[in-house]
Image (cartoon, rainbow, N blue to C red):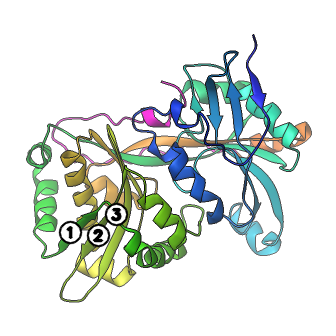
Amino acid sequence: GVDSPVSSAPLPREGWDQLLRPGMAPLSYGFLAPCQSTIDGMRWAPLIIDDACGAPSVRCPAFVHRVTLAERGPTALRSILGKVGVAVMETGNPCAPSAPALVASERSWTDALWQHFLSDGEASALVVRDVVAGSRLAGALQERGFARVGERPTFVVPLPGETMQDYLRAMRADYRRRARRTLELRLDIDVDVDFVSLSSEMAELFALNAARSTESRVEHVSPGVIAAWSELPSSRAVVVSDSSTGARCMALVLVDPPVLHFVRCGFREDDGRQLGLYRRLLYELVVLAYETGCSFVDLGVTSAESKLRVGGLPVPLQLWAKHRRAWLNPALRATARPSPPAIKRRVFRSALEPDGSWYRPAS
């Protein structure tokens, strides 16, 4: 028989995690479900497809929300049209970079996604986020009239050898000295599996970082969302603190071999810079990745320079969009810009290759 979409509903647990592959914890049901409260007015509109035997075939966490030019759009228009908004349907995790969907094997699902978008009826445009540049999915979207409207890299550290000492030995001398100086700072490090008691402080510090961010959408992560994430087997809170001042840098990560995902962090700006809390955090993520059997650290899409210095290599992720009114799509395509030049630092003596397989919907 022909696979067919199941009717839309709030994010359904049934069959969701059956399609997870190693490294795709940001798309797990437990991580996604609390995210609805993080964007004002957001509602889930997931694409659910089962095969002829009733087995899960596609689980795409699409969601609808209103975007204003104050959040995205040409700078020149923001002050004029800042209050004007448009409803869009997006795919993927609202709170962290992730693959756009979970898909059983390499099957075509983009046509079903477009029909799902049209049937939903509320949104004016469909946005497929975090598509690996040059991937089969990018080609399929281009063939179907989508426009590439944005590109940003996530920074992935490939871990050489099996220990932190292997990592340091693999570095060029100047980067190795910098790493050792940072690791020798008199700071306290805690990694917590159960961090419900920290959720209010984490939410406060995350909000400070979100308010400073100009590189990505700002989500509102409440203590309740963080407490829900604390229940996940893969989640950890990493806390870097200075006992003399009480300053803290707090991060949420997902330990998901072969990759450790750096989801978000928070700190007071002066503390982070003067005390080296954020620099130390990035190296401690590498330490934790080695200790938990990971081969890569996905550091995410912001703060490029700091992440490059610990060995992060750029993996370009693209935004593709299509408007429901066909006559507007040529104008949408006209907004596309050339891919930005790759930013790299030669941190390791031998060339290492990043990986981004966990951003691909199917293996």
Picture quadrant of residue 47: top right
Q: Which residues are magenta?
A: 336-363
Disc 3 from disc 1: Cα separation: 15 Å
Query: Circle 1 sits on which residue?
Result: 189
Picture quadrant of residue 138: top right
Q: Estimate how packed mark 1 is, as few (under 14), some (14 to 19) or many (20 or more) residues with alpha carbons within 10 Å.
A: some
Closer-to-camera residue (52/217): 52
Does the magenta segment cover residue 75?
Answer: no
Q: Where residue 86 appears, x then y in whole percent?
A: 82, 58
Does the magenta segment cover residue 351?
Answer: yes
* Callout 2 amino acid: Val
Disc 1 from disc 2: Cα separation: 6 Å
Query: Circle 2 sits on which residue?
Result: 239
Determine whether 44 is above or below 4 in the image. below
Closer-to-camera residue (337/21): 21
Identify which residue is drawn at 32% across, 61% down: 306
Determine whether 31 is above or below 120 in the image. below
Query: Which quadrant of the rendered structure holds the N terminus?
Result: top right
